[in-house]
Image (spheres, rainbow, N blue to C red):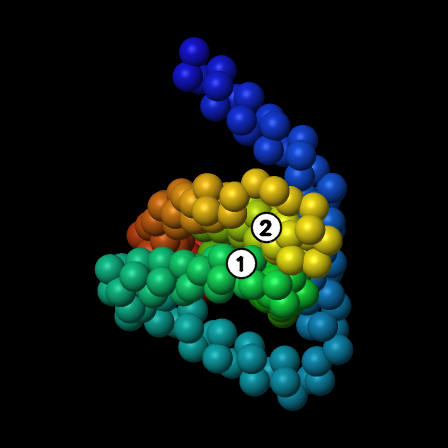
Amino acid sequence: MKKKMYQSVITSHFRDHSSIYLFVITLFLMGVIFGAIVVNSLSLTQKEDLFYYLSQFFGQVSDGKVAASNDLFLQSFFHNSKFIGLMWILGISIIGLPVILILLFIKGLVVGFTVGFLVNQMQWEGFLMSFVSVLPQNLIIIPIFIFAATLSVSFSITMIRRQFMKKMTQPMLPLVGRYALAFMAAALLLVAAAGIEAYVSPALMKMVVNAVQ
C-alpha cells in the first residue's frame, strides 16, 4: 500500500512539473555543450598550461599522493550541499529564479568543459579517464541538481504568483516544510555521491592512469 502511495506521489510530481523538468534538463545540456565548445576556443598556450597541471595531478594519483579519502568525502559533500543549499535559498526568494538557472547552466558548463578537455588532449585515454573520474559520482549528483533546480524554480514561481498575482490561498508553511524535506532527502543522496567520489573514483583513476602510462 505504501509502495503504491509513493509511486503515485512520484508520478504526480513528474507529471505536474514535466515542463519545468524539460526546460531544466535542456538548459543543463546546453551548458554541457557550451563547456565542450569552450575547450576549442582556448589558445594553445592555455591548453598546454592546463594539461601540465592535469599531468601533475595524474602523476600524484599514480603515486597515491592524493588527499585522504575522508577529506575528499567531506569536501565533496559540503561543496555539493552548499550548491543545493543555495538553490533552496534562491527558491524561497522572489528574485532568485534567474540565478537558479544560471547555477545549473554553470554546472553543465563545468562538466562539459572537463570531459571535453580530457578528450581533446588525451583522445581515447581522456574519454576513459573522464568515464572513471567524472561519470560515477555525477550519475547521482546531476539528477539531484536537476531535481533541486526544478523544485526551486517551481517554488519560486509559486512565490511570485502568491506575491503579485494573489492566486494562492493555500498556507505557505506546509509548502515550505515539504520543500525543505525534499532538499534534506537530496542532501542525504549526496552522501552516496561523495562516497563514490572519495573512495571509488580515485581507485578507478589510479587503475586507468597506470594502464595508459
User: Could you tell me which residue is drawn at 75 percent across and 78 percent down?
Assistant: 41
Q: Amino acid at mark 1?
A: Ile
Q: Which residue is mark 1?
A: 92
Q: Is residue 23 above or below residue 170?
A: below
Q: Position of residue 205 (x, y in %)?
A: 42, 57
Position above or below: 195 against 67: above
Report if the CB atoms under discs 2 and 1 are less than 8 Å apart.
yes
Dot 2: few (<14), some (14–19), or many (≥20) neighbours within 10 Å? many
- 3D distance between C-alphas at marks 2 and 1: 7 Å
Left or right of 50, for residue 120: right
Viewer-side residue, 141 vs 182? 182
The x, y position of residue 62, in whole percent, is 35, 65
Residue at 60% across, 83% down:
48
Q: Nearer the viewer, residue 169 or 101?
A: 169
Which element type, helix, strand or loop, lies under badge 1? loop
Q: Position of residue 200 (x, y in %)?
A: 35, 49
Label 2 SS: helix
- In the foreground, 111 or 17: 17
- Residue 73 lies in what quarter of the image? bottom left
Which of the numbered marks, if any, corresponds to residue 155? 2
Disc 1 residue crowd, few under 14, some 14–19, many 20+, Cα 10 Å = many
Which amino acid type is shown beneath numbered disc 2?
Phe
